[in-house]
């Protein structure tokens, strides 16, 4: 169960991470807790699955990387096996299952187009699925989503 300190921490860190040598000290100051407590609470929330990911998001094409959203039609009896193969790659950044005939959706980010294509080819070989839908973005839209967690205090 989250208390008000957890909620204040989440309200803050979902929109701002200080770019400093001691970001948790600054976070703690902003939400009224110590640096150590900010670190421990963040770890706890991550372990509990309340925080799914903690890290920077980069505009990868501007950094010279190649990426793609890939979808596949995987029979239900093969989903676990295929997902295990896909998730074994560090280049896979997201992997989702959908309730649709095209049921596995994942993204790959690679150093360049050659590595991206080689990874896709290897995944086809390892999963036994010859056809993936490879979807490339034409324009990137980033939507800021922040959830205000009500607190019982003025923090």
Image (tube, rainbow, N blue to C red):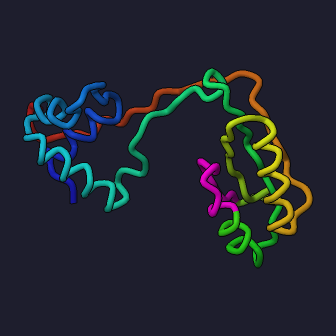
Q: Percent from the top left, x then y, of residue 147?
A: 36, 36
Location of the N terminus by quadrant is bottom left
- Above or below residue 75? Residue 144 is above
Picture residue at 68% right of the left edge, 46% below the top? 107
Numbered label tally: 0
Residue 98 position, x and y percent, is 69, 57
At x 63%, y 61%, the residue is: 87
In this view, the residue farthest toward the bottom is 77
Residue closest to the eye, 4 or 152:
4
The C terminus - image quarter: top left
* Above or below for 153 versus 97: above
49 relative to 44 in the view: left or right: right
Specify the farthest residue to the right: 130
Left or right, residue 140 beside residue 116: left
40 relative position to 104: left or right? left
Q: Position of residue 21 (x, y in %)?
A: 23, 30
Q: Residue at x 70, y 67 (%)?
A: 85
Q: Which residues are magenta?
A: 86-98
Asked which quadrant contains residue 109, the reply is top right
Q: Give residue 62's quadrant in the image.
A: top right
Does residue 96 belong to the magenta stretch? yes
Name the spot of residue 49 as percent of width and height, x first: 37, 59
Q: Nearest the camera: 70 or 4? A: 70
């Amino acid at each position: 169960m989250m208390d008000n300190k957890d909620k204040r921490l989440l309200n803050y860190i979902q929109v701002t991470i200080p770019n400093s040598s001691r970001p948790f000290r600054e976070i703690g100051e902003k939400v009224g807790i110590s640096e150590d407590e900010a670190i421990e609470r963040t770890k706890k929330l991550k372990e509990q699955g309340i925080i799914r990911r903690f890290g920077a998001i980069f505009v990868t094409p501007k950094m010279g990387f190649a990426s793609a959203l890939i979808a596949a039609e995987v029979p239900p009896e093969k989903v676990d096996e295929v997902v295990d193969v896909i998730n074994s790659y560090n280049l896979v950044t997201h992997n989702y299952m959908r309730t649709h005939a095209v049921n596995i959706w994942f993204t790959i980010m690679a150093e360049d187009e050659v590595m991206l294509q080689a990874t896709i080819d290897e995944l086809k070989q390892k999963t036994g699925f010859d056809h993936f839908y490879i979807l490339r973005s034409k324009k990137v839209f980033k939507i800021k989503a922040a959830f205000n967690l009500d607190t019982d205090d003025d923090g």
